[in-house]
Image (cartoon, helix red, strand yellow):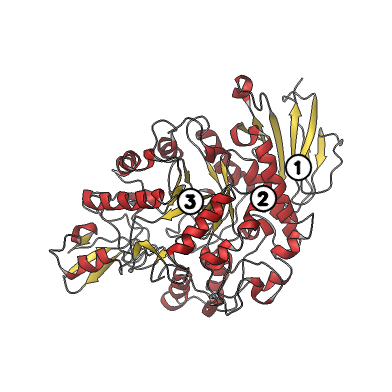
Amino acid sequence: MPADTWWKDSVVYQIYPRSFSDSNGDGIGDLQGIISRLDYLSELGVDVVWLSPVYKSPNDDNGYDISDYHAIMDEFGTMADWKALLAGMHARNIKLVMDLVVNHTSDEHAWFQSARASKDSPYRDYYIWSTQPNNWASFFGGSAWEYDEPSGEYYLHLFSKKQPDLNWENPQLRKELYAMMRRWLDLGVDGFRMDVINMISKAPGFPDATPQGAGPYHFGGEHFVNGPRLEEFLLEMKAEVLSQYDVMTVGETPMITTEKAAALTDIETGSLSMVFQFEHMDIDEDPQTALPRRSIREWSLPELKEVMSRWQTALQDRGWNSVYLCNHDMPRSVSRFGNDSRFRVESAKMLATFVHLLGGTPYIYQGEEIGMTNVAFSGIQAYRDIETRTIYREFVEEQGRSPEEALRIIHAKSRDNARTPMQWSSKSNAGFTTGEPWIPVNPNYTHINVEAAAADPNSVLSYYKELIKLRRHYSVISRGDYELLMPDHEHLYCFLRSNKKAATESRGAGERMLVVLNFSAATPVFVFPEDIPLAGFELLVSNYPVDPAEDIEQLTMRPYEARAYLLVST
C-alpha cells in the first residue's frame, strides 16, 4: 500500500439508493435514478460515492440482508444498469465504494438454504450453530439465537433472525468471500465500506454475556466486538485481496478503541484505510442502555470535544480518521447537533465547517448538503425500519409504556430519519418519484430541497461546494496536525490545524488554520490565545457575512456561527 493515497484528499458522498432518486415511478430509488443525478454530484465536487447495498435481497433490513452477492436487487435495476452507473461515475472522476456485508447473509442466501436443509451440507459450517444457545441479545431485540426445528439446533443472528451470522472460522467461507470481493474489484469498484466488520470474530465457546439488568437476554459485545482473530482475518483479507488493488476501505467498527483503530489503519502494517468510530454518535444515549436508540440524554459540548479531539490526536501520524455526523443508521445531523428550526441554515453550515475542516476524510450523507432534518411521523405505521418498529413494540407492548413516549425516542433517534426520500424539488413527493414513495417524504420538502438551494448563493448547498473547494486548495485541511483550544468552553469549539511537517514539502509548507465554531444560539466571545504567534490572517470561510479585515483578537460569535482563518506567523 502506498505511503500517500488518494482517499486522504477525497470527500465521500453516501447514497442510500432506496431513497435517492426513483426513475420508473414505483416509489423506490434505483440505479437509473442515481445515474440521472450524477451531474449534481459532480457539481457538488465529491470525489467518492459510497453506495449502500444494491445486491439481491429480500429487504428484511433494507438490503443489509444479502441473498446473492453477485446479483443486483430487482427493485434497483440490472447489472447493466450498475455498469452504466460505474462508467458514468468514472467519466466524471468520481470513484465508487460498495458496501461489503460479510458478517452475515440473508436466510434466503443459497448457502444458508443448503445449510439448514441438512447437517451434512458443505455449507452447514458457513454459519454458527448450537444446541445450547447463550444469553446474547440481538441488536434488533430478543435472543440472538433462532431455533431451526428440522435440525434441532439454533443459529446465531446478531441482527434480524433473517440475517444469520457467517462463521469466519471456516477457511473455505473466507475463500468464497475473497473471491466475491475480487470479482467486484475486477469490475472496477474502487473500494469497500465494510459493514460491522469488527464483529466477524467471536470468542471461542460463545460464553454468556454479563447481565445488564432484568430479562433473559443481554448485550454480548464483550465476546464478539473486536474479537480474538479480527486483525488476523483482516490482514488475510488484505494479503489475499486488498493489497492487489488501489482501493479505499472503511470499516464500520462500533465500540472500537483509538488504539485498535490506529493498529487497523496503520499505513504500513494495518489492513484498512480508515474506520468509522461511534463514540460521538453515542453521546446523547444513556450509557446504562446497552442497545442503541433506546434512550436520549442531554450532552455537553466539552463531551463532544473530548471524544473528537481524542480521535484526532490518537490517529495523528499513525492511522487515519473518517469524519461524519450522519449516515443511513443515524438521525439527521442538523436535528441532532444543531438547530433544525430558527437556525437550521446557520447550524447546518456550522456543522459542515466542523466536519470538513477536521483531520481525516469527510463524509456527506445524502441530503445533509441541503440541511435535511429529522422527520416526526405521527404514528408508527409510517415507519419502515425494522429496528424502529422493534423499539416501538418493546416500549408499548412489552414494557407498557405510552405510544407518546416511544414516539419521542423514535422522532429523535429512528434510522428512518435519514431514510426519507431525498428532497429534490418542491414538486409532489419532493421530485423523488412520480409514484407513491416507499416511505413518506418529510413534509418540509416544500422549502428544503435541491432546486431551491441551487438557486440561492447563500444556501447550505452553496456553502458545501465552497468547503469542498477549500479542502482541495489547502493541504493543511487534510494533512495538518490538530490542536484543541478552550476545551472547557460550553459553547465554542475552537481548534488549530498546522502543517508542521510540511516544511519539507512543496505544498502547504507551514500553513496554519484557526477554526472557531459556535455550537449554540448564544453569543459567546472568542478571545485569541496569547501564546499563538500571529502576524496576520486571512478569512477562508464563514457562514455569516464578515468583514475580512475585522480584528480576530476578540470576536463576538453569532448563533451557530462558523469562521476559519489562515494564520500568518511572525
* Residue designated by label 2: 351
Q: Categorize mark 1 by other alpha carbons within 10 Å: few (<14), some (14-19), many (20+).
A: many
* Residue designated by label 3: 97
Vertical side of 175 occupied by 516: above or below: above
Q: Categorize mark 3 by other alpha carbons within 10 Å: few (<14), some (14-19), many (20+).
A: many
Left or right relative to 478: residue 339? right
Picture residue at 59% right of the left edge, 59% below the top: 366
Instruction: Give the mark nearer the N terminus: 2 vs 3.
Output: 3
Q: CA distance from mark 1 to mark 3?
A: 30 Å
Under circle 3, the secondary element is strand
Left or right relative to 270: residue 95? right
* Residue designated by label 1: 541
Under circle 1, the secondary element is strand
Does residue 535 appear in this view?
A: yes
Instruction: Give the mark nearer the N terminus: 1 vs 3.
Output: 3
Residue 394 location (% of width, % of height): 43, 72
Q: Residue furthest left?
A: 120
Q: CA distance from mark 2 to mark 3?
A: 24 Å
Judge depth for marks 1 and 3 and give the one in front: 3
Vertical side of 366 occupied by 377: above or below: below
CB atoms of marks 1 and 3 within 8 Å = no
Quarter of the image where the N terminus is located: top left
Vertical side of 96 occupied by 444: above or below: below
As shown in the figure, which amino acid type bears the numbered disc 2? Leu
